[in-house]
Amino acid sequence: MTYSEAIQFLYGLRWFGAKFGLENTFKLAALAGNPQAKLRFIHVAGTNGKGSTCAMLESIYRATGLRVGLFTSPHLVSFRERIQVDRQLIPEADVVRLVTQLQPLLKQFPADHHPTFFEVLTVMALQFFAERRCDLVIWETGLGGRLDATNIVTPLASVITNISFDHQQWLGDTLEKIAAEKAGIIKPGVPVITATEAPAALAVIDQTARNHQSQLVSVGRWAGPPAEWGPPLPLPGDHQKMNAALALATVEILQPQIPASRPAIRAGLAAVNWPGRLQLIATPEGRRILLDGAHNAAGAAALRSALENEFAPTRPVIIFGALADKKWEEICAILAPVAAKVLTVPVASDRTADAAGLARAFHAANPALETAAGASLADALNTCKHERFILITGSLYLVGEALERLGAPPAGAGERGLNEWTAPARPG
């Protein structure tokens, strides 16, 4: 099997859709020797900020000298971004080997209960991290938490970044319902750290923690470490300060199990890197291209705040694309007041929103704004080739395509389609 053939096999698993439930993942992990039993985890759920918080935790603990696994989704360009050890992407040869090893195990499932792409990916990651003898794994949920495939582990700490509206068709249409799904990662006696501020959502997390006799730390009520611990974050945006406070609170709670010195914490935060989230690329011609996967209203609000506070008075030309199942009208309304002009484009996905519809939403939110619908990101970039400040946003799929076209890391090509999946109705 070649690497491209392994990717094709994984791509084929998308046709099994996405299932809510842990039965398949538990069974497949057991057939693979329960690699999760050999590992320690920090499990991270939430609506926004999961990836950034995971990146901060990984960087801090790597700075202490630990071998740290990192499991995140979706990937921007290369499938291999999802499974990393010490921020090195899983080698292609290991992807091939693990797929080859898992194929016979998949035959032990009936056709109507075949493991999905994400279930297979989860067990692949566990196997790889166990083989590499990771001292700690930073473990991000895929969707929700309670019935997400990642929830077969018992972590050292459960982290819930925040709760806002996203994926309502699968997680529920109220903050309480969404919070209940995210709080499903809480395990008996395992501490919970959250940056959730919405009272209704926080109440659900608090009650779940009480039910499991788990200590709850809310960074909203937490004084944090001394100011001298924190260097300027390399990730812009006020929301990253909250993510950093959450990561630091987690490190503090886990000091008895995983000691981390102040120099290591400072070094880890100073070196954190997380592509596609307020990532600024300077071109040789002196242009600035800002990339941010603001794919829901809360993310768009954080992006607008950063534009107003850290990039003003210059307004960007926005290249915007979104998935049709997102609340893109809200996102357009949030971003329209801070744009110089807007070019809307389709996203390379079957679920893309219509570019013309996106343009109309921007115009409705700001009738004075110059808007136009384009055929592709490539065309939009060509149209904007003389603009000094460009923002590409609305979907991580679009951000991944931009990174690929701009030749920026992470490396890889042709694997963004693996992010496509079909979810069932919301679980009961």
Image (spheres, rainbow, N blue to C red):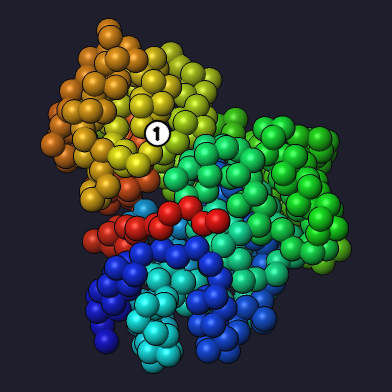
At horizontal 42% and vertical 85% (from top left) the residue drawn is 109
Place of residue 262 in the rendered image (x, y in percent of width and height, measured from the top left): 79, 51
113 left or right of 242 in image: left
Local packing at callout 1 (Cα closer than 10 Å; few below 14, some 14-19, many 20+) is: some
Q: Residue furthest front?
A: 428
Q: Quadrant of residue 377?
A: top left
- Callout 1 secondary element: loop
* Nearer to me, 108 or 217: 108
Place of residue 394 in the rendered image (x, y in percent of width and height, measured from the top left): 36, 36
At horizontal 39% and vertical 14% (from top left) the residue drawn is 337
188 left or right of 143 in image: right
Query: The residue under label 1 is which amino acid type?
Result: Lys
Residue 262 makes an appearance in the image: no
Q: Is residue 163 above or below residue 366?
A: below
Q: Is residue 375 above or below residue 215?
A: above
Q: Quadrant of the C terminus?
A: bottom right
Q: Quadrant of residue 41?
A: bottom right
* Nearer to me, 35 or 112: 112
At horizontal 45% and vertical 17% (from top left) the residue drawn is 312
At horizontal 65% and vertical 71% (from top left) the residue drawn is 153
Q: Is residue 202 above or below residue 87?
A: above
* Nearer to me, 110 or 68: 110
Place of residue 330 in the rendered image (x, y in percent of width and height, measured from the top left): 41, 26
Place of residue 255 in the rendered image (x, y in percent of width and height, measured from the top left): 83, 59
Q: Residue beneath label 1, please?
A: 327
* Nearer to me, 277 or 44: 44
Residue 251 makes an appearance in the image: yes
Q: Quadrant of residue 115?
A: bottom left
Q: Quadrant of the N terminus?
A: bottom left
